[in-house]
Image: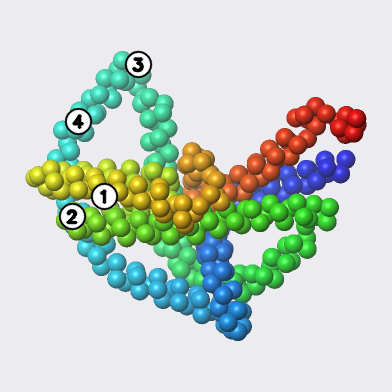
Amino acid sequence: MLEKKHTIFWIVITSFLFFAIYTLSSVLTPFVAGMILAYLLDPLVDRVEKIGMKRSLSTFFVLTIFFVCSAGSSLLLLPVILSQLSNLTSFLPTLISNLEPFISQARSLVDNAIKADNSNQLPLPVADILNWVGGFLTEFISSSLAFANLLSLIIITPIVAFYLLRDWDLIIDKVKSWLPITQHMTIVAQVVKIDRSLSALVRGQGAVCLILALYYSVSLTVVGLQFGILIGIFAGIVSFIPFVGAILGAILSIGFSIIQFETYTPILLVAGIFLIGQVVEGNFLTPKLIGEAVGLHPVWVIFALLTGATLFGFLGVLLALPIAVVVAVLIRFSLSSYLESEIYSGETDVDKRD
């Protein structure tokens, strides 16, 4: 009876959180960004605090260093990125004219497929993909890049991060005191696993994306690709989705190199850059910086990101991986409990004593 009440309680809490996120998704983005930032920087604040600096001062110091470094990097990269974006805009007519034969051929193939099926609509998978991409881009532009939301991100995120970082330990202790006494040890054990996995995922994957963005940008620029920095940064950032960053970056880079270069050598070098990037990421960066703590299958990661983006837009993208980690840990715990239960073994406590 008690276990049934516990189950109902956690179902109600989870349902309430989901409803709150769904209802307030349009205003939660800066607060979630502040929470993620606080989670990322908490270990640094703890280290500074151990030196002898007060928590408030440690928080202010770490946040100041973080935003100064971020602003400095942005100021250094922004002119280059804007210049390459400007060049890309002027290059697009040439690109479209070069791709027009391929586009016409692809369109004719689609038209023939539609006529063969006696349908006036695209095949369902293609239509679903196009609808999702269009909807996601529309949501992303309207919710994330709108001036008001961008302003709230710039102003509210640092404030939320400061107060969360300053009171982080107090918040953790307070939440622990609210846990059911009979389930306290079990919940804390699972939270520790979640924290370990989440830390490896967020901090480790962030470092992997940063290293790959730097590697791709520098390598493609050295080869002489016209939009190397832009494509390299994009490929590095998108690398948090398994294989997608490298695949998209390779397609864009090889496509532009075929148009730009007249010989095969630079094209092969561009392909080799992404091949080496994947080898280094899979054999060195991911094992060293992320390790085995996460245990998320690539398909699960992609599913989580698509689901989050579909349900909550840009906010869903921010929440997708943390929620995926929580769900994965809880599923493993439930599975291990099931394998140890009499439901699986068919043996009751009386049978075991006999």
Q: Is residue 259 left or right of residue 166?
A: left
The residue that appears at 65% across and 72% down in the rendered structure is: 167
- Element carrying mark 4: helix
Q: Earlier in the sequence, mark 3 or mark 4?
A: 4
Q: Earlier in the sequence, mark 4 or mark 1?
A: 4
Q: Nearer the viewer, mark 2 or mark 3?
A: 2
The residue that appears at 44% across and 52% down in the rendered structure is: 286
Please state which amino acid type lies under the numbered disc 2. Answer: Val
Q: Earlier in the sequence, mark 3 or mark 1?
A: 3
Please state which amino acid type lies under the numbered disc 3. Answer: Asp
**Whole-percent x and y of residue 171?**
69, 67
Q: Residue 273: which numbered mark, if any?
A: 1
**Whole-percent x and y of residue 93?**
16, 47
Please state which amino acid type lies under the numbered disc 1. Answer: Ile
Q: Are the residues tagged 2 and 1 within 8 Å (C-beta)?
A: yes
Q: How many marks?
A: 4
Q: Nearer the viewer, residue 350 or 137?
A: 350
Disc 3 target residue = 117
Q: Is residue 148 above or below residue 121?
A: below
Q: Is residue 100 left or right of residue 242?
A: left
**Whole-percent x and y of residue 97?**
14, 41
Label 2 and label 4: CA atoms lie apart by 31 Å
The residue that appears at 59% across and 73% down in the rendered structure is: 46
For the N terminus, the quadrant is top right
- Element carrying mark 1: helix
